[in-house]
């Protein structure tokens, strides 16, 4: 692995490490990313018809059915070596903040003790009227050729429609995790940006905040991104290969 020895020393002495993940970290678990040219969700589906409050208002069964299909994929997948390396890292540095844009729960299932979910959680739907969480059963999906339409359940407290627990286009990020993420990005010594295209704001701004704060910034991605020229080091390759190598080299098991 091509990490200059000076940078290895800098990473080793980092007291506060931030790990910031995007869809690429879960790609090798079989969960599609958003902007892959062939398999990306936003390449194959129209975000405006599925991922906005207006879309849910207009056609709740279409939106709920699509998210239940995605929840099925999450439930059928397992954490990969990248999720596990990040979980192991938490026990090897003084302080680790894990921030994700992903709505899956693979970091938690890999053993990461605390995860700041900036874009919500697909397995935690809530009532669109009163905001209370809804206990989810295993997804019941219609037959695959049924367009995946499914009526959303009703809230047991107020009768409102249950909505997916994710942040949609046009909605604000959840306040507390966002504030914690900004504080961590501004105050950390090392920032690992893993598997994100860094095109969605405000989340993408976290890496820039870490760069401005002069943290050592490492980007892991199979492809080029708009941050390539700005970070301290680019590690080009799949997260499930690169992260275990990076963690083993810089923060080996005691
Ligand atoms: P994208 O689909 O925009 O980007 C995924 C990134 O992961 C790309 O840069 C890929 O090159 C990279 N990638 C793919 N496979 C990889 C692998 N095995 N190892 C390393 N890198 C890999 O996904 P995000 O950046 O996460 O928002 O997208 C950000 C937000 O846009 C999502 O959270 C979602 C979406 O709209 C909401 O749902 C609110």
Image (tube, helix red, strand yellow):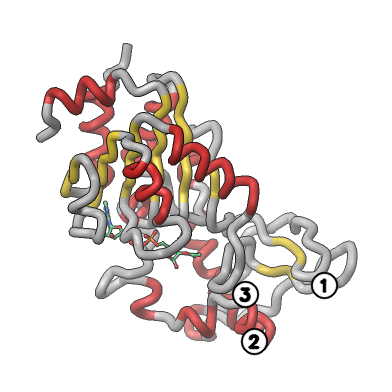
In the picture provided, is 249 more to the left or to the right than 49?
left
Mark 2 packing: few (<14 Cα in 10 Å), some, or many (20+)? Answer: some
Residue at the limit of the structure toward the right, as seen here = 158
Residue indicated by mark 1: 160
Between discs 3 and 2, the one toward the N terminus? 2
Check the image and report above or below for 129 versus 94.
below
- Disc on the earlier residue, 3 or 1: 3
**Does any portion of residue 1 appear in the rendered image?**
no
Above or below residue 168? Residue 196 is above
Visible in this render: residue 28? yes
Label disc, if present, on residue 59 of the rendered structure:
2
Q: Residue at x 32, y 70 (%)?
A: 35
Q: Percent x, y for residue 14?
A: 34, 23
Q: Earlier in the sequence, mark 2 or mark 1?
A: 2
Please tell me in which quadrant of the rendered image residue 125 appears. bottom right
Relative image position of residue 167 (x, y in whole percent): 58, 64
Given residues 142 and 34, the one toward you in this image is 34
Q: Does the beta carbon at disc 1 come under 8 Å from ligand 1?
A: no
> Residue beneath label 3, please?
64
Does 61 sit left or right of 159 as displayed?
Answer: left
- Picture quarter with the N terminus: top left
């Amino acid at each position: 692995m091509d990490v200059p020895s000076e940078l290895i020393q800098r990473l080793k002495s980092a007291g506060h490490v931030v790990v910031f993940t995007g869809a690429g970290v879960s790609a090798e678990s079989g969960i599609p990313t958003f902007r892959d040219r062939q398999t990306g969700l936003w390449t194959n589906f129209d975000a405006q018809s599925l991922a906005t409050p207006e879309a849910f208002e207009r056609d709740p069964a279409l939106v709920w059915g699509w998210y239940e299909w995605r929840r099925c994929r999450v439930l059928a997948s397992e954490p990969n070596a990248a999720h596990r390396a990040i979980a192991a890292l938490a026990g090897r540095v003084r302080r680790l903040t894990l921030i994700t844009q992903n709505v899956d729960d693979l970091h938690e299932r890999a053993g990461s003790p605390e995860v700041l979910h900036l874009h919500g959680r697909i397995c935690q739907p809530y009532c669109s009227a009163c905001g209370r969480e809804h206990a989810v059963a295993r997804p019941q999906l219609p037959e695959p050729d049924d367009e995946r339409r499914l009526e959303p359940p009703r809230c047991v407290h107020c009768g409102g429609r249950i909505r997916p627990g994710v942040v949609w286009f046009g909605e604000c990020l959840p306040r507390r995790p966002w504030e914690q993420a900004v504080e961590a990005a501004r105050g950390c010594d090392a920032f690992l940006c893993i598997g994100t295209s860094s095109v969605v704001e405000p989340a993408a701004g976290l890496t820039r905040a870490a760069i401005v704060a002069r943290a050592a910034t490492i980007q892991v991605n199979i492809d080029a991104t708009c941050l390539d020229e700005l970070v301290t080091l680019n590690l080009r390759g799949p997260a499930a290969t690169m992260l275990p190598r990076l963690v083993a080299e810089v923060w080996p098991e005691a």
